Amino acid sequence: QVQLVESGGGLVQPGGSLRLSCAAPGGILSIATVDWYRQAPGKQRELVAVITDKGITNYADSVKGRFTISRDVAKNTVDLQMNIRKPEDTAVYYCNTKGAIIGIPFDYWGQGTQVTVSS
């Protein structure tokens, strides 16, 4: 079992920015599709950004144009740059990677990092 580790969360004002980072041992984040999810209080977990193993990115409509997902191969991290405009961005943010290696499936999550938007 691989534990992903998120970092970079905190308190941010509307109009500010944060950069979240997802790290994992080994090189799995460099070869697999990685997702960022978020879960706001009382709401279901929501997929916000994806980067595939080939570097193709996709975003939820709610964050498109404001969030950028990227992979740093040298650091073996997947980052989420967030330009915060809305208190609705307040949530616990999780990274996830899942797939299969030589036919063996995997599905790894982090513990999450809290982002709180408040003026």
Image (cartoon, grey):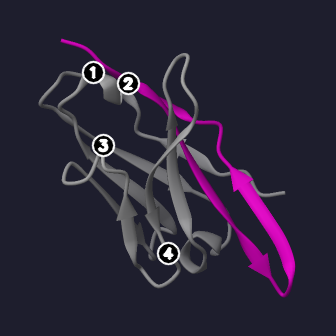
Q: Which residue is mark 4?
A: 52
Cα separation, mark 4 vs mark 2, equals 25 Å
Q: Which residue is mark 1?
A: 87
- Extreme residue toward the left, this view: 15
Which of labels 3 and 2 is toward the front? 3
Question: Counting other residues with Cα less than 10 Å from the Cα at mark 3, is it few (<14), some (14-19), or many (20 or more)?
Answer: few
Which comes before the other along the chain, label 4 or label 3? 4
Q: Could you tell me the amino acid type at mark 4?
A: Thr
Image quarter hosting the N terminus: bottom right
Q: Which residue is mark 3?
A: 62
Cα separation, mark 2 vs mark 1, equals 6 Å
Which comes before the other along the chain, label 3 or label 2? 3
Image quarter hosting the C terminus: top left
Q: Could you tell me the amino acid type at mark 1?
A: Pro
- Marker disc for residue 38: none
User: Magenta region: which residues?
Assistant: 90-119
On screen, residue 119 versus residue 50, left or right, reads: left
